[in-house]
Amino acid sequence: MSKTASWTLYRGQQGQWAWVAHRITGVAIFFFLLVHVLDTSMVRVSPEAYNAVIGTYKNPIMGLGEAGLVAAVVFHAFGGVRIILIDFWKKGPKYHVQMLWGVLGLWAVVMIPFLFIHLSHVFGGR
């Protein structure tokens, strides 16, 4: 492709990857909510089946899944604030890369203590 033919906005830069990550985390959260509504609704159908399903969630693999869910929610939330700032702040588009680094920094500040506490419960007992 020639240098003059620029038909994409990001072409693999930070903004494109932020967009992709925001969509992936949004879809992951949606599917979690779908499963959550379905398994919670089982309590009305059969409390025994509900207890059996909830019992399967009490293992280290699901603990890691919970950590991934929290990571997705936190990134999605901070990324949503970034998108709002880009859309409604006059200088937002100019600083979108710096705001992405801010999102990643805030995400790390929130996730590191959470992971330490959560994973110590998952693997160390309650």
Image: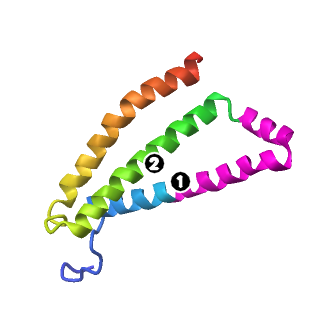
**Visible in this render: residue 4?**
yes
Q: From the image, which quarter does the N terminus lie in?
A: bottom left
Q: Nearer the viewer, residue 4 or 117?
A: 117
SS for dot 2: helix
The residue tagged 2 is 73
Q: Amino acid at mark 2?
A: Val
Which residue, as the protein is rendered here, is positioned at the far front? Answer: 44
Q: Position of residue 40 (x, y in %)?
A: 71, 47
Q: Amino acid at mark 1?
A: Ile
Query: Residues in magenta?
Result: 27-56
Crowding at dot 1, Cα within 10 Å, few <14 / some 14-19 / many 20+, comes out as some
Q: Position of residue 106 (x, y in %)?
A: 29, 41
The residue tagged 1 is 29
Q: Look at the numbered discs 1 and 2 and tell me whether their residues touch, using CB distance below 8 Å.
A: yes
Residue at 73% over, 37% down? 54
Q: Position of residue 85 (x, y in %)?
A: 24, 62
Asked if the stretch drawn in magenta spans residue 48, the answer is yes
